[in-house]
Image: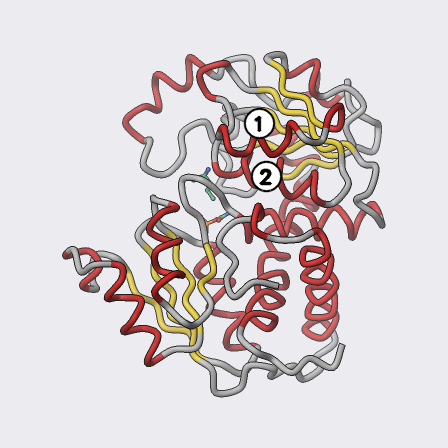
Amino acid sequence: MKKDLLKLLDLESADIARILDVADQMKYSQHHGLPHHYLEGKVLAMVFEKNSTRTRVSFETGMYQLGGHPIFLSGQESQIGRGEPTEDTARVLDRYCDGIMIRTYSQDEVETLAKFAKIPVINGLTDFCHPCQVLADLMTVRERKATLEGLKLCYIGDGNNMANSLIVGGLKCGMSVSVACPAAYAPDQQVLDFAAAYGDKFSFVRAPAEAAVDADVICTDVWASMGQEGEAEKRRAAFAGYQVNDAIMALARPDCMVQHCLPAHRGEEITAEVFEAHADEIFEEAENRLHAQKAVMALLMGADLPF
Ligand code: CP
Ligand code: NVA
């Protein structure tokens, strides 16, 4: 495993499998009240330059449950928001803390932070990717379907950070992945180049109805991500027809799951009916952020795990 979790492209398939196995153990320990203070005395700095509910609460709670201490740093209230260079922030946090989680816009900023910090850096979302979310998604699918190998994951909507991470994570875990996006909203070229090596295990089409056929899990995400609020209206028009609804679900396998990283916009990327019919899976996915990230923190921050 590398020092950091910056993007799923950096992970070996075996790393992802190890994270998911440790995540299952973390979940078992927490649900059964078993002690799991694997990061006693360790400190995680959490830098947020974008809003968050799940990421903040799950990292903060997770660090506490592991016996460590989280520190919340908002971009606006720290010197980061006043332009202190990332290289300097890295070399300062490095001397106080044992790990850094960062949510920001630019992937380059996260890569720079990791380059200048000796301690592990965990990507809590950039415009390019959302690796922690997709680890939780893979955990949820594996939990419910017993395996990932051979399943079909379908993503409908914006070729955004979630699409990029789902494509990479799904393919690395042996799933086949089908994606439907409008032409102007394709996933990142680096991700499409990666996926091209998987031959017919990956398909990228325009029509959601084509991508959804025989899917075991259908994923979607908002049409306008954080930072794109000004484009919301234009995007609503561009994504009309890219909704996960009953007609799309009818094309998938009868036991098809639905995953949504949340927050969801009912009536846009997903109907209220489909959302509520799959709410158990979607909120389990949200819960699994906690367990998956505890696994990532334990593995990267030097926990002495008994499993
Ligand atoms: N899914 C997710 O990352 O949620 P938050 O934006 O609330 O952290
Ligand atoms: N694509 C969304 C995900 C939010 C968790 C965004 O970046 O805003």
For label 1, the SS is loop
- Mark 2 highlights which residue? 260
CB of mark 1 near ligand 2 (< 8 Å):
no
Number of the label disc, if any, that sits on residue 270 = 1
Number of the label disc, if any, that sits on residue 232 = none
Say left or right for 147 vs 81.
Answer: right
* Amino acid at the residue labelled 1: Ile
Q: In front: 113, or 182?
A: 113
Instruction: State if disc 2 and disc 1 touch (CB < 8 Å).
Output: yes
Residue 261, position as x, y percentages in the image: 55, 43
Give the vertical position of 185 relative to 282 (above or below): above
Say left or right for 180 vs 76.
Answer: right
Q: In front: 123, or 260?
A: 123
Q: Residues within 10 Å of mark 1 (few under 14, many from 20)?
A: many
The residue at the point 61 percent across, 39 percent down is: 166
The residue at the point 48 percent across, 17 percent down is: 239
> Looking at the figure, which quarter contains the C terminus?
bottom right
Residue 145, position as x, y percentages in the image: 83, 45
> Looking at the figure, which quarter contains the N terminus?
bottom right
Quarter of image, ligand 2 = top left
The residue at the point 60 percent across, 20 percent down is: 180
Residue 125, position as x, y percentages in the image: 44, 48
The residue at the point 63 percent across, 15 percent down is: 205
